[in-house]
Structure formats: C-alpha cells, structure tokens
Amino acid sequence: MKNNPIIVAVATAPGRGGVGVVRLSGQNLLPLAQILSGGKTPKPRVAMYTDFTDDQDRVIDNGLLLYFAAPASFTGEDVIELQGHGGPVVMQMLLQRCVQLGARLAEPGEFTKRAFLNNKLDLAQAESVADLIDASSQSAARMAVRSLKGAFSNEIHQLVDELITLRMLVEATLDFPEEDIDFLQAADAAGKLQHLWAAVAQVLVHAEQGVLLREGMKVVLVGAPNVGKSSLLNALAGDEVAIVTDIAGTTRDTVREQITLDGVPVHIIDTAGLRQTEDVVERIGIERSQQAVQQADVALILVDQREGLNETTAKILTQLPPSLHKIEVHNKIDLTGEVAASVSRETGQLQAFTTAETVIALSAKNGTGLDLLRQALLQQVGWQGESEGLFLARTRHIQALQQAQQELAYAGQCQHNQIELFAEHLRLAQNALNEITGEFSADDLLGVIFSRFCIGK
C-alpha cells in the first residue's frame, strides 16, 4: 500500500446541502493540507477552521480541515477531510483543486478497500459499511452496526480457531502414522468435528436471518383478473399505490412497493391478472408478471371468496414454480359475511387440490385479516424475530458457510481410514470460512464487492 496514489472524492451525497465533505487518502498528506489551507499546519485529529485556496491563493471556500495521520485513520493512511459548504459547484471546485495537486478520483468503495487492505477492518466488516448505508429498516441498520463492530467476524474467528485446533491434531497423526487412529480417538477428534459442524450450522441459521433482514423478501401477487390484487397491495402499503376499478385487466404492468414487517423489508409486486388475452399491452404485462413470479420468494394467490378456488385459479397454482412458497388469499369476505381465518398444512385441513402451504380469508377493502397475512408471510420465509445474536449477512456468506459445512461432512466420512483426506477437507473448510472475513479471497472477488460501494466510501 506504500506506493498507492492519493485518492479524492466527495464523500457527501450529490446535490445541495448545508455541509459538504471532500475526502482524501494517501501517504504524506501533511504538505498537501498546508497548501490547501494557505500555509497553515493542522494538528492531527484537531479541527482547524481555515480558507481553502486555489493555485492563485484565491479563496474557494472556508470551513473545517481535519487531518488524520496514519495509521490512526479510517483507511490506515493519511486522511484529509475538507468540510465546506455543500453546494455542488463548491464541491467540484475543491475536488478539481485536489486533483490539480496530484490526487486522482477515487473508485467506488476505494476508501473502504484501503481500510481492508491495511487491516483496519476485515471483509465482513467492510461489507457492513455499505449495508449500513443501504439499510432499509431500523432493524437492518442495527444489525449492520453489529456486523461493523465485529459480531459476525468474531463468530467466524471462533469457528476458525476450533478448526485450527482440530487440524493440528490431525496433522500430528500424519507424522506418526502407526498411531493415528488411537491418537485421534484419545483426542476425541470425532466429538470435536461433530461440535464444529453443529457450531457452523448455528452460525448459518443466524446468517440466513441476516440475509433476509438485508435483502428482504420478494412477494408477488398473482391471480385471475379482478380478484383484488391491487386492493391488497394498497392495504398492505397503507397508500393508494395501485389503481383499483371493477374493470378486469386494470393492472397492465407490474406495480412495485416496499413495506416493512417486523423490521424485514418486503418488496411487493402487483402483477397483471394471468389470463389469455388478445390485448398487446396487457399481454406484455402478463409476461412481466410471469418473470416476477420466477424471481419471488412468496406468491400470494388471490381468490374471490364468492367464487372459491375455481378452475382458472387452480390452473395458475399448477403453473407456479414448485420451490416457491405459496399463500392462498381468499379475498372479499366483507361481501360474504365470513370472519377472517388462517389455515395451514400444519394446523388444519386444506383443500386437496391446492398446493399452497397456507390459506387465509380476509378483506383487503376493510383490512380484516391483514395481520394474519403479515404473520403468515414472516413464517413462510422463516423469520424468527430480531435478537441480540443476529448480524447482517450476504448471500456469499451463506454459500461459504454451506461449503464449510459440506467439507466438514466429507471429513466425517473419511476420518477413520483416510487421514490425508480428512486433513484436506478440514483445510478446505477453513478456506471457506476465511473467505467470509477476507483472509482467503481472490482479487476478482474483492473487485466485485467494493465496486458496489458508493463513491467516497
């Protein structure tokens, strides 16, 4: 990192604001700070009020200059922050002045990437920086902070430490092959392996909850025309986000809305009624509806309670992906005089010809039964509620934990008669876990991760 160029970016959001921040990172930035401040010498970690000048000593702006000397900075390098007035023209003038003095424009996530490469934080913590910025609920923000503080990383490090201890026992047997089985039995290698597998499984459960909290669930509303899909979307969103009429085919394109249930972001997609039609515009909407179904986590199949599960809706059910969670929603009970109810395969008898896991009777018009639907949605995706043990996680973390779990299972199959393979599977399990914190990672993976950050972070 010693030969890295100086990088600069506007760290605040685009547009006008009361305060704007230009951030620089690199080696030996004190002379540059003196030039920017018209010859003043800032003290490390002390805010200095000053004018920011151009190459002709004209004042560009005035504000605070903060100088963080390496390694006591976010990136581990010298860092300068220029806190001025938040006008876009002023920010660009300061940015251009820094470039004129030898800095180059930072790439997305480059400040955080340098912090990772300088061991100021590991890869899981680095990712949590972006997750905290992008958090779409208070629960997600709290869990992102836990990850940033190292909650997730600490659990991974504990698993790695246990795995290293087991590997040391196994590697020792390779030096004394005539005693390998007895040695491993005496050290309870099988018990340690089983405990380690269970510990990975527990972290995996928490990580899956963290992924759900970060990414949310995708819910698609499907059904025949005029069964109340748009009314249900409006009821869940608490706003008139979709047009509602008595005319079949009113919704001709997908309508998207995001809500939050118990801290979990829920992305709801109202689709065009699935049916055969000669209308070109409606047909395109139906094709988009089918694409939305393929990408969804849960499908709400709406049924007019007055008609029941007719042949049209039963056909729609058979066309849905088998792996898709399904909730059958019988709408318009306000017109039939029935009460709200929920029946699942675990708690009651469902109609034999439905493939849904749960059937709920409700009224989107007056809101009766909506709480039952909200509870059913969370149950379908396995949400267990926010707890102190949770942390924000990503899909790649899930894949790495699953890979480690699989390698541990393979190790268990060959621990008694194939010690070399036993040791190799343990090594591969450790590599998988180390991918989470970045101690074992490819450069192309780092490029993908940090390219999704915002500029200036």
Image (spheres, rainbow, N blue to C red):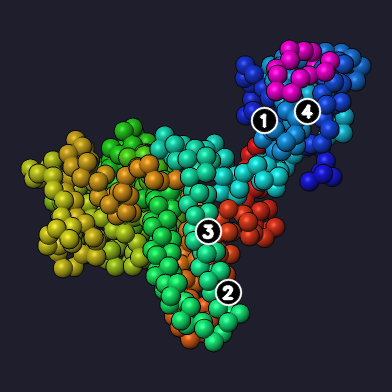
Q: Magenta segment, principal secondary structure? A: loop
Mark 3 surroundings within 10 Å by alpha-carbon count, few (fewer than 14), some (14 through 19), many (20 or more)? few
Dot 2 or dot 3, earlier in sequence:
3
Q: Are marks 2 and 1 in contact (CB under 8 Å)?
A: no
What's the amino acid at mark 4? Leu
Residue drawn at x 45%, y 72% is 187
* Amino acid type, mark 1: Ala
Give the answer, above or below, for where 195 lies relative to 58: below
Q: Is residue 191 magenta?
A: no
Between residues 439 and 104, which one lies in front from this camera angle?
439
Query: Vertically, is 179 above or below 386?
Result: below
- Residue 127 x %, y %: 57, 46
- Mark 3 and mark 1 in contact (Cβ < 8 Å)? no
Mark toward the start of the polypeptide (1 vs 3): 1
Reading the image, the residue beneath label 3 is 161
**C-alpha span from label 1 to label 3:** 38 Å
Observer-nearest of 137 and 242: 137
Residue 245 placement (x, y as % from top left): 28, 40
Q: How many angstroms separate mark 4 from mark 1 (CA)?
A: 11 Å
State the SS at label 2. Answer: helix
| Span of residues in magenta | 40-52
Q: Secondary structure at mark 3?
A: helix
Q: Is residue 50 magenta?
A: yes
Distance from disc 2 to disc 3, alpha carbons, whole Å, reads 15 Å
The alpha-carbon separation of the residues under discs 2 and 1 comes to: 49 Å
Which structural element holds mark 1? loop
User: Circle 1 is placed at which residue position?
Assistant: 11
Alpha carbon distance from label 4 to label 2? 55 Å
Q: Which residue is mark 4?
A: 95
